[in-house]
Image: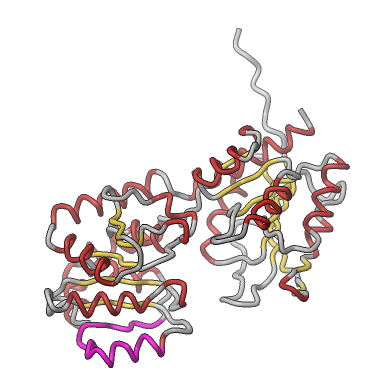
Amino acid sequence: MTPIQHPLPSLRVAIQQPALPRYRVPFFREVARRPGIDLTVYHADPVLGPPSVPPDGFAAQLVQEKILPGGLIWHPPIATLTRRGACDVVVLAGNIRYLNLVPAMLRCRRQRIPCVLWGHGYSKGERKAMWKARLAVARLATAVVLYNHTTRRRYLEEGFDPQRVFVALNALEQEPIQNARQSWLDRPADLAEFRRRNNLDKGPVLLFVSRLYHEKKPELMVEATRLLVQRHPTLRTIIIGKGDLEPAVRQMVRDMNLEPNVLFAGEIYGEDKLAPYFLSSDLFVYPRRIGLSLLHAMGYGLPIVTSNALDTSNPEVEAMRDRDNAWLYPGEDPKDLADAVSHLLADEPLRRRLGENARRTVLDEFNIPRMADGMEQAIRFAHRYYHP
């Protein structure tokens, strides 16, 4: 006898977020496409960084949060969405600096409201007391969604029920990246002209795309460039992005007489404008604390070169496999960084293999549908927990 297939219940799902960045829109759109999920995202505008963008393919509401003394935050939807009848499942951002987070989660437990906690699940370099506090808050949730399997294993080691801890691998939408990549590859004359116009036609070319902040160590990129030009006089390093350290980094370039070798391209938005820089580069070099940028570079088939101090990086580093789609150099020594780059520049077949594996990684594993799968599984579990 064929078992009866019961349709999935229709759920009103509310997701609370600190902001609605552009890269997150495709993910929410994919979640909203899932059958039976009526999604609304409640978000603020970030105090730092670019403003939130309009929703596309899902409902969203912009709210006003309050920044309190001591770095605490009051986010109104946390309170309103965790009241009975407000929604069928609520997904809360796992920032323990939200002052109203714990009272809201306790109310969810008392009133049997399905509550999912979503976030990194850790903070780089946090003290033991903060880690224990983070775990205590997570235990209040019906389900927890984390950005990678490494963090999930840490939670299971702390005694969390495996059935209640899910992974939504952080991802970027690859379709616009692949479309822009193919568009330029189909116009080799235009790409050759771009390279000539920007003095990228002699090579080799290294690419860094990120905000110029201290934690990223962009000065290591300049110091490594100084060492590399001794072996590769026509080498060009492209720096895309702005930030607090830009004046200091520019001064380093002048002091080291590297102006012919370093191109400051500024802030560039739009995949079609970024694509020729990626396609003109041999390696994506990110000295320290790499994150989502690696998924962007992998989409273009660029091997990643970054520090092996992965505990200081973001959860997306799970996509990297040393000597398979990336090359990790030890510590934060510019000589070690230069040696790693030089080794790869001397081995074109190795670069090609790393690049092909990198692109395959993001197309097959770290993509928006798989990320949405993890979130949907957590939402469905949380609802079944109280409504079997």
Residue at screen point 18% across, 74% down: 228
> What's the magenta region?
247-266
Residue at screen point 25% across, 50% down: 356
Judged left or right of residue 203, residue 320 is right
Which residue is at the front of the view, 164 or 268? 164
Residue 59 seen in the figure:
no
Q: Is residue 234 magenta?
A: no
Quarter residue 158 falls in = top right
> Extreme top residue here?
1
Residue at screen point 58% across, 59% down: 123
| Location of residue 69 with respect to 356 vertically, above or below | below
| Location of residue 69 with respect to 58 vertically, above or below | below
Which residue is at the front of the view, 337 or 293? 337
Q: Quadrant of the C terminus?
A: top right
Q: Quadrant of the N terminus?
A: top right
Q: How is the image coloured?
A: secondary structure
Residue 363 image point, x, y percent: 37, 48
Which residue is at the front of the view, 187 or 115? 115
Residue at screen point 67% across, 41% down: 379
Quarter residue 129 falls in = bottom right
> Extreme front residue here?
128
Residue 106 image point, x, y percent: 83, 48
Judged left or right of residue 267, residue 115 is right
Residue 288 seen in the figure:
yes
Q: How many marks?
A: 0
Residue 281 image point, x, y percent: 24, 68
Residue 150 image point, x, y percent: 49, 45
